Image (cartoon, coloured by chain):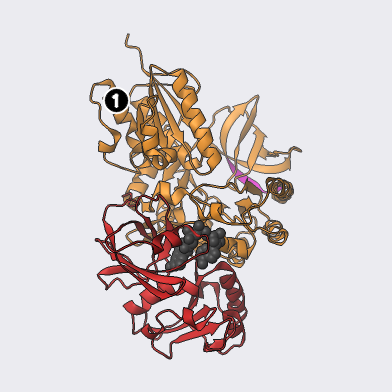
Chain colours: A orange, B red
């Protein structure tokens, strides 16, 4: 019997990276490899790195060293943003077999296959294709991402991504639609539209909203979720799309700061007022629309007053979850060169304040949802209890008899578990 | 696809001092295509240090110009001052969306508000579209910072000087805007330091401008 070659994955950083790893897992699986846990010894180890902060660099480096030490006889493939940012340095390390940039990440399976069949090529000789990933297998998750865009041209002062992920590029609408059709045919019930800055989607004049609209018109029993989005990435009519039953009424809309001055120093492309007007417009049309967000605390020059504006904003906008990042200096960015850096102690205090408000907001939002119906996509069933997410992106648990997962159930929300990470309870309708 | 590379060779052609702390750096264009308002990432070859600079010249010119103010203890603004004709530069870009939607439409009034070298993208735009119906309000300290003022039509360029009394308005841009003397425009573009932009936006919003009429490019 032929022994299958093994492959292990280590993924750092963002959701896009996670999606790209999932696609590579599928690609290796389809090519006849046996996928093992990330920490296991394997014939091939793929490390999908991140470089967004100095700490991400450190973590990525550590992960590479650890994996290489463990797999001295195996192939070590390093890809992701660190591979773009420090290509030459990484190529000089003997422990790494291949350094593959983001452009060619989708071709890693061919590269590795070639290696084992004696067709050794330098990754740079392969054609770049940011969207050439395999369609993710249903066995991995109940929801899958479809990548519509890569890169970013915004140049926020805290972010290194534009210089590593490169210029914004959009996947042709036709390919996006084909991809969605394929994942729906594969049995996925939830499709997450993803990319680095999806609001900047532009396929020969077709905008982000146009592509979402076309995806919604595809046949099949599935729903569409939009991954994180910048507030300047859509028109004033965007909320109207959410009247479509397939589009989940939830947006992760990145605020970063509630202070107009800090937003300008970050070179964000919107004002706090504009953001609030957007939230209000959505809530006027869909009162229980769920907004979540990202906030950076301790950006250089952030005064108590600026921070207070962020706090007030979060309360007023009622984000049901705030992902708080302490500002982290990233070499090579403008923010790193700014004077008035905020101390770690102040950042920790501010981050704790936001964490608490986020928790309060979450409880309040869940409370407001009680008595309402949700269409829950069941991800797991254990001990007669099903769990999954409703269309508003709240976790819901409820009793079921049928243990099948990856199906929708209509549920009435009855309460919330009292914990720091609460889950809504419900009953089948 | 990935265009952040130095594919073309860019060599210094001239360094022209417009006053004792500001200069125009001119270099060869290679095959670069850009739109007025876009910026480049620029540094001396081999230094590994780059900073953003708005393109000062028009896409109609065969060379590229940038307008640079020397920043005390600044790294790149100082390095670039010392380059000589023939030296190679490291150039990446062009980037950005500022002004790229501003192509003049008939009957559309544009208000440009700049502090210091924030005038650069407007210069590029105005040199490209001299027929545009614009007003350019330039916030500077002294009148010697009214860089290349003769490039603009006299009734369209307006200097607000925070020091001295030789400006068209003696005071800050924000004081001028508050005075309510400026006629209403259809779109307002602001470029330069963030605190000027922040204060000016507040005033403009209070004067009835909608957010979709205001566009910003922050330098620092
Ligand atoms: C999109 C964009 C376009 C720009 N276009 C231009 C341009 O056309 N002309 C131009 O002169 N500059 C422009 N800048 C600013 C430029 O990129 C550099 O920041 C500036 O030249 C200082 O760089 P440095 O290496 O000399 O100073 P650094 O070593 O980076 O130190 C800069 C420090 O000085 C402070 N500072 C004080 N005055 C200034 C100032 N006037 N500008 C920047 N930082 C200042 C900063 O806050 C920072 O802490 C632009 C910036 C951006 C983001």
Q: Quadrant of residue A91?
A: top left
Image height of A309 relative to A30, above or below: below
x, y percentage for residue A1?
32, 8
x, y percentage for residue B198?
59, 70
Q: Nearer the viewer, residue A304 or A419?
A: A304
Image height of A125 relative to A35, above or below: below
Image height of A21 relative to A233, above or below: above
Magenta part of the chain: A370-376
- Residue drawn at point x = 42 percent, y = 64 percent: B53
x, y percentage for residue A134?
36, 35
Q: Nearer the viewer, residue B18 or B102?
A: B18
Q: Secondary structure at mark 1?
A: helix
Q: Check if residue A374 falls in the magenta segment.
A: yes
Single out the residue that lies furthest toward the right: A418
Q: How many marks?
A: 1
Image height of A402 relative to A185, above or below: above
On the rendered structure, is B128 left or right of A21? Answer: left
Q: Nearer the viewer, residue B203 or A254?
A: B203
- Residue drawn at point x = 40 percent, y = 71 percent: B23
Q: Check if residue A38 falls in the magenta segment.
A: no
Q: Nearer the viewer, residue B198 or A207?
A: B198
Residue A332 seen: yes
On the rendered structure, is B114 left or right of A344? Answer: left
Residue A371 seen: no
Q: Disc 1 marks which residue?
A: A113
x, y percentage for residue A241?
49, 59
**How many residues crowd around disc 1 within 10 Å: few (fewer than 14), some, or many (20 or more)?**
some
Single out the residue that lies furthest toward the top: A1
On the rendered structure, is A227 left or right of B30? Answer: right
Chain designation of label 1: A
User: Is label 1's Cβ within 8 Å of ligand 1?
Assistant: no
């Amino acid at each position: 019997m032929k022994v299958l070659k093994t492959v292990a994955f280590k993924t750092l950083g963002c959701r896009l990276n996670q999606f790209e790893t999932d696609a590579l897992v599928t690609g290796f699986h389809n090519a006849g490899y046996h996928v093992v846990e990330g920490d296991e010894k394997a014939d091939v180890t793929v490390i999908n790195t991140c470089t967004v902060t100095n700490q991400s660099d450190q973590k990525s480096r550590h992960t590479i060293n650890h994996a290489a030490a463990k797999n001295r006889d195996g192939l070590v493939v390093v890809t992701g943003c660190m591979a773009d940012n420090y290509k030459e340095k990484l190529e000089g390390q003997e422990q790494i077999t291949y350094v593959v940039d983001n452009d060619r990440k989708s071709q890693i399976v061919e590269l590795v296959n070639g290696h084992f069949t004696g067709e050794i090529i330098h990754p740079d000789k392969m054609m770049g294709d940011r969207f050439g990933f395999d369609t993710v297998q249903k066995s991995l998750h109940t929801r899958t991402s479809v990548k519509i865009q890569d890169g970013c041209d915004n140049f926020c002062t805290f972010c290194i991504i534009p210089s590593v992920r490169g210029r914004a590029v959009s996947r042709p609408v036709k390919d996006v639609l084909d991809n969605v059709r394929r994942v729906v045919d594969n049995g996925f019930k939830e499709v997450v539209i993803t990319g680095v800055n999806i609001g900047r989607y532009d396929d020969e004049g077709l905008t982000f909203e146009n592509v979402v609209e076309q995806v919604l018109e595809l046949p099949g029993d599935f729903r569409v979720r939009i991954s994180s989005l910048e507030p300047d990435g859509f028109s004033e009519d965007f909320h109207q799309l959410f009247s479509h039953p397939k589009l989940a009424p939830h947006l992760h809309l990145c605020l970063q700061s509630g202070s107009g001055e800090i937003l300008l120093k970050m070179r964000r492309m919107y004002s706090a007022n504009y953001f609030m007007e957007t939230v209000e417009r959505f809530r006027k049309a869909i009162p229980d629309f769920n907004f979540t967000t990202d906030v950076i605390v301790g950006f250089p020059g952030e005064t108590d007053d600026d921070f207070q504006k962020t706090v007030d904003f979060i309360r007023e906008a009622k984000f049901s979850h705030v992902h708080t990042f302490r500002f982290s200096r990233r070499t090579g960015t403008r923010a790193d060169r700014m004077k008035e850096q905020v101390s770690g102690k102040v950042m920790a205090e501010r981050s704790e304040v936001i964490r608490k408000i986020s928790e309060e907001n979450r409880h309040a939002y869940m409370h407001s949802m009680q008595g309402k119906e949700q269409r829950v996509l069941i991800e797991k069933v254990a001990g007669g209890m099903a769990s999954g997410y409703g269309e508003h992106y709240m976790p819901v648990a409820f009793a079921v008899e049928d243990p099948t997962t990856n199906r929708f159930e209509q549920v009435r929300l009855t309460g919330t578990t009292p914990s720091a990470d609460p889950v809504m309870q419900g009953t089948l309708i | 696809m990935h265009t952040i590379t130095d594919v073309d060779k860019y060599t210094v052609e001239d360094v022209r001092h417009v006053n004792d702390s500001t200069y125009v750096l001119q270099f060869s264009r290679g095959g670069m295509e850009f739109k007025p308002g876009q910026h480049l990432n620029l540094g001396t070859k081999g230094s590994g240090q780059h900073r953003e600079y708005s393109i000062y010249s028009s896409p109609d010119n065969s060379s590229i110009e940038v307008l640079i103010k020397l920043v005390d203890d600044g790294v790149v603004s100082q390095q670039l001052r010392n380059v000589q004709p023939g030296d190679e530069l490291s150039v990446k870009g062009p980037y950005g969306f500022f002004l790229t939607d501003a192509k003049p439409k008939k009957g559309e009034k544009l208000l440009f508000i700049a502090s210091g070298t924030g005038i650069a993208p407007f210069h590029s735009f105005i040199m490209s579209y001299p027929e545009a119906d614009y007003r350019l309000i330039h916030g500077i300290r002294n009148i010697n910072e009214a860089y290349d003022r003769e490039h603009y039509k006299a009734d369209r360029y307006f200097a607000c000087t925070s020091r001295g009394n030789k400006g068209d308005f003696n005071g800050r841009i924000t004081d001028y805007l508050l005075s309510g003397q400026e006629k209403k425009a259809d779109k307002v573009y602001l470029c330069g330091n963030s605190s000027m932009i922040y204060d000016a936006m507040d005033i403009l919003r209070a004067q009835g401008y909608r957010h979709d009429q205001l566009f910003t490019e922050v330098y620092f």
